[in-house]
Amino acid sequence: MEDAASFLRGELRGLFAPGGEVTRARYSPSLHFEDPITRLDNLEAYVLMVRALKTVFNIGFELHTLEVSGPDEITARWTMTVEVWPLPWRPTAVFTGRSKYVVDASSGLITSHRDTWDAVADNSFPSLEALAVLMRQALDLTQIPKDLETPKYSVVRAGRGYEVRRMEGFLVADAPMAAGAGPASGSGFNTLAGYIFGGNKEKESISMTTPVFSEVTESGPQMSFVMESKYSDVSSLPAPLDPRVKARAVAPKFVAAARFSGLAFDWEVDSAERALRAALLRDGIAPAMGYRLARYNDPTVLPPFRRNEVLIDLPDFEWP
């Protein structure tokens, strides 16, 4: 089984790369494949499915773990991103889940491959819920500006109504918002804009990034701009002229995110936060107190195309 596991680690890491192909010699000709929306019963159909996915979509695949989980079973945990490039708005669907492989002890051939998705409660084929998840992501019109830098992250779980992200560290500049300002308020924006557009001791212009964060802290509501990644630490940032602007480092961490479109009125933000918190608790994930609103687009973008997110820290989340 360890030989089969070692093979699958290499197979999965290269399968969706340019030139990657299914290694036919390691699979049974009568291979059974099943996920919530597909069922196949021979190796040739399996090979054609993989080729079709690579042809029609831009596929990203990250293997998180792969281990022997039974006498004849191997389990893998993964994240797959699927850019639907034939659609004009080029949406990217994100799926996470588990693959279970059954290996014949006598021949060493893989006889079964079964995928389950984290975003689906009932993974039985055929799953209308899974089809709805797929369509909802394909029809998502919200956009992130392609020309603006944004903090880097990877999705480790795409659950029912949320993503769990492993965020890399980044720098922000904070400014206070007006007392009593709601999460969707624009208060504080002009203060931060003044800082990045030369309102600092070096008179240096800092490129606009995305998203713009707002949250309520112990000292009151505040807005935050993400700083360019070319700045290595807080001390390398230009010193602000306005004493209300404070720079800080955000450490790497796990966060939960729920996305919605529109103008992000306060009631929409509150509703999204409650739904996200309920979904996390349903799945046994402990959310921290508080949340942040992330807004990705400028005011000229029409509401259906605006991407907004509610983010909640997950200090106790363990991965993998």
Image (cartoon, helix red, strand yellow):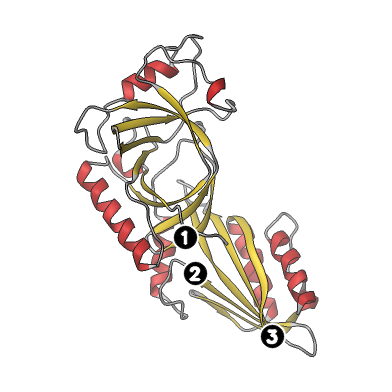
The residue sitting at 32% across, 57% down in the picture is 277
Q: Which mark is residue 117?
A: 2
Secondary element at tag 3: loop
At which x and y percent is residue 156? 53, 57
Image point 59% across, 63% down: which residue? 78
| Residue neighbourhood size for the residue with mark 1, other residues' Cα within 10 Å, grouped as few (<14), some (14–19), many (≥20) | many
The Cα–Cα distance between marks 3 and 1, rounded to whole angstroms, is 28 Å
Name the quarter where the C terminus is drawn: bottom right
**Disc 1 target residue:** 158
Mark 2 vs 1: CB contact within 8 A: yes
Q: Is residue 199 above or below residue 299?
A: above
Query: Which of pointers 2 and 3 lies earlier in the amino acid sequence?
Result: 3
Cα distance between the residues tagged 2 and 3 = 22 Å
For marks 3 and 1 on the same chain, the one whose residue lies earlier in the sequence: 3
Give percent across and percent down for residue 93.
49, 56
Side (left or right) of 293 relative to 318: left
Sequence-wise first label, 2 or 1? 2
Q: Look at the picture and state if 221 lies above or below 5.
A: above
| Mark in front: 2 vs 3 | 3
Give the x, y percent position of residue 217. Answer: 31, 37
The local secondary structure at tag 2 comes to strand
Q: Residues within 10 Å of mark 2 (few under 14, many from 20)?
A: many
Mark 1 element type: strand
Which residue is label 3 attached to? 72
Number of numbered callouts drawn: 3
Instruction: Say what amino acid the circle numbered 3 marks.
Output: Asp
Q: Mark on residue 229?
A: none
Q: Amino acid at mark 1?
A: Ala
- The image quadrant of residue 99 is bottom right
Rendering coords of residue 279 (x, y %)? 34, 62
Give the alpha-carbon distance from disc 2 to disc 1, as whole Å. Answer: 8 Å
Q: Amino acid at mark 2?
A: Trp
